[in-house]
Image (tube, grey):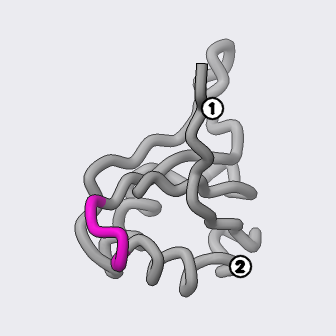
Amino acid sequence: MKLLIRNLSRSTSEDEIRRIFASYGQVQSCNLVLDKATGKSKGFGFVEMPNNGEAKQAVKNLNGMELGGKNIRVKKAEEVVD
């Protein structure tokens, strides 16, 4: 399941996010969305977890959690249809 993480502090790293989500299960991938011009975080990213049950637990427990001075928002990422 692909998860969208929003409202991240600009100083939050991919390693931090991976570590937090890994406490709920296997993390297949983790990537922050970066500004092409500055290379800095845009304040959101994606985590993929292969086990849907673990992903749902992560959403339930991490949505609204304080991280880097901000309350993050976590939800299932919407599928984009071309």
Q: Which quadrant is the N terminus positioned in?
A: bottom left
Of labels 1 and 2, the one closer to you = 2
Along the line of sight, which residue is nearer the eye, 26 or 79? Answer: 79
Q: First in sequence: mark 1 or mark 2?
A: 1
CB within 8 Å, label 1 to label 2: no
Q: Position of residue 18 (x, y in %)?
A: 37, 60
Amino acid type, residue under disc 2 in the picture: Gly
| Amino acid type, callout 1 | Lys
Residue at figure coordinates x 70%, y 46% from the top left: 43
Quadrant of the rendered structure where residue 69 is?
Answer: bottom right
Q: Residues within 10 Å of mark 1 (few under 14, many from 20)?
A: few
Tag 1 residue? 40
Q: Which residue is mark 2?
A: 64
The image shows residue 31, relative to residue 1, as above or below, that is above
Magenta stretch: dominant secondary structure: helix
Q: Is residue 47 left or right of residue 9?
A: left
Which percent across, then down, holds residue 51? Answer: 28, 68
Disc 1/disc 2 C-alpha distance (Å): 23 Å
Q: Which residues are magenta?
A: 50-54
Dot 2 falls on a residue whose secondary structure is loop
Q: Quadrant of the C terminus?
A: top right
Query: Is residue 57 shown left or right of residue 28?
Result: right
Is residue 68 inside the magenta stretch? no
